[in-house]
Amino acid sequence: MVCQSNPVVQKVCELYEKISKLETLNPSKDVNMLFTELVNTCMRPNPIDVSKLCQKIQEIRSHLIKLCGEAEGLLESHYSKILGSYENPLHHLNIFPYFENYIKLSLLEFNILTRQTAINPPRIAFVGSGPLPLTSLVLATKHLKNTYFDNYDIDSAANSMASRLVTSDPDLSERMTFHSIDIMDVTYALKEYNVVFLAALVGMDKEEKIKVINHLAKYMAPGATLMLRSAHGTRAFLYPVVNSRDLKGFEVLSIYHPTDEVINSVVMARKLPLQPAVHQPLDQGFGSIVLPSKCACAEIHSFNPINRMNMIEELSLEEQLS
């Protein structure tokens, strides 16, 4: 069984045992060392399919993802407080240990977005922005310099820290707002956005993630773009996996799996128009049915030859960025 024979899985389980015994996940020498080792272990190329792991390892993975999410949130809060103490916080973003990863990830997402849409969206929603909204900050300062960003986070304390980072910048303080609200309570306002980003830490288990995606599918405008983050191979020990079948109500345009130090896979999908009910003749004994989403059976992209060409183009992005 792969659970018993795969050395990477064994190493991940060893690290999980150590991490789960920590008294706190606040940044410290021991915490930083263990999570750095975990990330480096999971980054190594490995074709493992985590969905086929045994129940015991599935439970470990589920708990580990939550521990990683908690640690990441505490790390971001720690550095957001430090950055907030500077007169110009945006001049010092590079003190965050993974800032270069966000630079690369944001460039990757921007390239995928503009290849598919060919427009600079006037307004973007970022769901789960947190205390250190690096994706929004990088996109707003380097790639989408005329776009307005609405950042949503359920934690008002996180939003207070995040807003402090942009108050000294006259441009970003005008283009970036922070909303303290559960995204499940945001309904028709979602129709205002051309693009919605869903952070990896929103929905730390499969059921919660799908619940949020279904809510977005219900209220986003038809044709709007959803950008979300997933994980592939052993990187799925760090973040939840989002598959095409999880995106009901959307047409999946591409799924890109980096192989460098960028951990997250990038999923891009388009909100489908509402499908009208199809009525069968009464003598056939069927009521009305709704046509299924095109993407329901697609693993990588929808059954559209143009999308397939786009996917091939996007897969070459890694070579361009290296």
Image (spheres, rainbow, N blue to C red):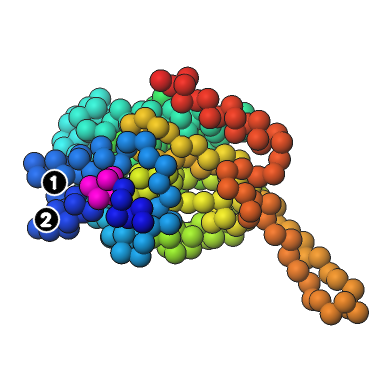
* Mark earlier in primary sequence (1, 2): 2
- Tell me the SS state at disc 1: helix
Is residue 8 one of those drawn in magenta? yes
Tell which of 217 and 253 is nearer to you.
253
- Which amino acid, by three-letter code, is at mark 2? Leu
Is residue 34 one of those drawn in magenta? no
The residue under the point 43% across, 50% down is 49
Tell which of 154 and 215 is nearer to you.
215
Does the residue at mark 1 contact the one at mark 2 (Cβ under 8 Å)? yes
Is 207 rendered above or below residue 48? below
Main SS of residues in magenta: helix
The residue under the point 41% across, 20% down is 322
Mark identifier at residue 31: 1
Q: With 16 as the anchor, is 3 left or right in this view?
A: right
Q: Which residues are magenta?
A: 7-12
Badge 1 local density, few (<14 within 10 Å), some, or many (20+)? some
In x, y percent, where is residue 131? Answer: 28, 46
- Which amino acid, by three-letter code, is at mark 1? Val
In x, y percent, where is residue 179? Answer: 39, 51
The residue under the point 14% across, 41% down is 33
Is 270 rendered above or below residue 283? above
Tell which of 274 and 91 is nearer to you.
274
Q: With 17 as the anchor, is 42 left or right in this view?
A: right
Is 200 rendered above or below residue 258? below
Residue at image mark 2: 22
